[in-house]
Image (tube, grey):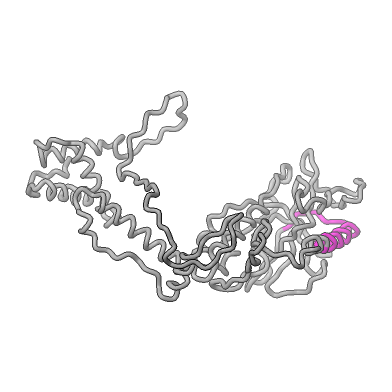
Amino acid sequence: MPHAFVVAEFTPRRSARWTSGYGSLKATSLATRPFLALRISRTDIGYGDNWSEGDFLFVISPQKPSGVNEGCYFALGSSLDEGSKTLHVEPPLHPEGGTLYVHTFPRLLEHLGFEPPVSVAHLPHQLEESSYFTFCRSVLDDYDRMLQKKYTNDVDKRSSGGSEPVEDEWHTWNTHQQTEGALKPIGYVFEYLEPQSFDLSAVEPPSIYQELLLYNQLTADYSWMGITVAVNWALKLRNFDRAHKARRRSLLLPDSSFGGNVPTFDENIKEPALILWSMKIPFDGDPPIGSQSSDSWDLDDDEPYVELDLVPDIMSPVSAPSTKVIAFDLFGTILDRDGAINDAICLLSPTHPDRHQLSKLYLECELMRHRDNSDAPYTAIVRHALEDICIFLEVPRSRPDYTAT
């Protein structure tokens, strides 16, 4: 009866190799925590060997499962404990002041891919033989019960793609879609940790179920056919919009001086994108979408548009009693950056009537210089920004070394 109590941790990055490049990159941002589990061979619960699929993991928690999985559990006790929902473990696996429960559903399948099975570190605990067979039978019974509950009276039920029912006169949601990269594998990739790295005296409720829900949603968002082309286009458009807004609000350059071209879709995605853009998003209670001519679209030009200033506003001070940590900004606190800039601008134009306007102008020049050449030394960015001020003020650049301040 091959089984083991293990400490496992879900690895989203390795699990998401099948999805798009952006999906694999995004999966690295998912936070995970180790959890305690019972690892059982797939052959002991009625499945044959598969080169890409490993064993099953059953989550162990100090809490019983709730919701649709209510009742799918066994308590982990010793041979002295009695009860039909108790499994005997030797030596006993008891946290301080509590009982652990092993969930029989859902079962988490390992995905091995092209990597051969590795030896897994495990805890020195084993189920008694009768308890092990009882658990395997219950896993099969609970799985069959869940399937029966799902499909009973649901043969003709239409799917909306979610939990909401399909409204009258609407068709079912088509769940089949093409994906980028490989097909989605069955199962997940887990990493097994040394038992001594896990505190068995204070086992917390696991977060693995929430982690897998987030992972499944993430891979669905980043695996549909065309996601890479669409994201690349969106990133180009975002950079274009930022550069356009910076120059359009600049005091130095008129809007006509910016001659960039708006990024466009590639031909292989342009037509589907236009079709998608023209579709109306249905809401609950809406009638079925009928044919609509292209002349019937009504664009509302009165929608509010909020523009944020490039230069942030000064924040009000924070009261001392509520302060726990103080972080000093290099410019303005340790180094008097603003004072040096104002002194340099005074050298360029001692009689200019609006010092505030010149300071704002300088900050815009510095921002655009830094955006165009972010790897340049800061002294070079300051020098070029001051040269831009000279051009605006129509003063010669052969003045005293204003960067020395």
Q: Residue at x 32, y 64 (%)?
A: 262
Magenta segment includes 311: no
Write the residue at 61% across / 55% down: 285
Image location (x, y in percent) of residue 183? 60, 73
Question: Which range of residues does the magenta coloring cover?
Answer: 122-144
Chief secondary structure of the magenta portion: helix
Query: Is 137 colored magenta in this rendering?
Result: yes
The picture places residue 150, in percent across and down from the top left corner, at 77, 61
Q: Position of residue 114 (x, y in %)?
A: 63, 73
Where's the C terminus, which quadrant? top left
**Which residue reaches farthest top?**
321
Q: Considering the image in quadrants, where does the N terminus appear?
A: bottom right
User: Is 62 placed above or below 120 here?
Assistant: above
Q: Quadrant of residue 289?
A: bottom right
Is residue 375 something one can see in this rendering?
no
Q: Tell me: 383 left or right of 60.
A: left
Query: Which residue: 13% across, 37% down?
Result: 346
Depth order, front residue of 394/186: 394
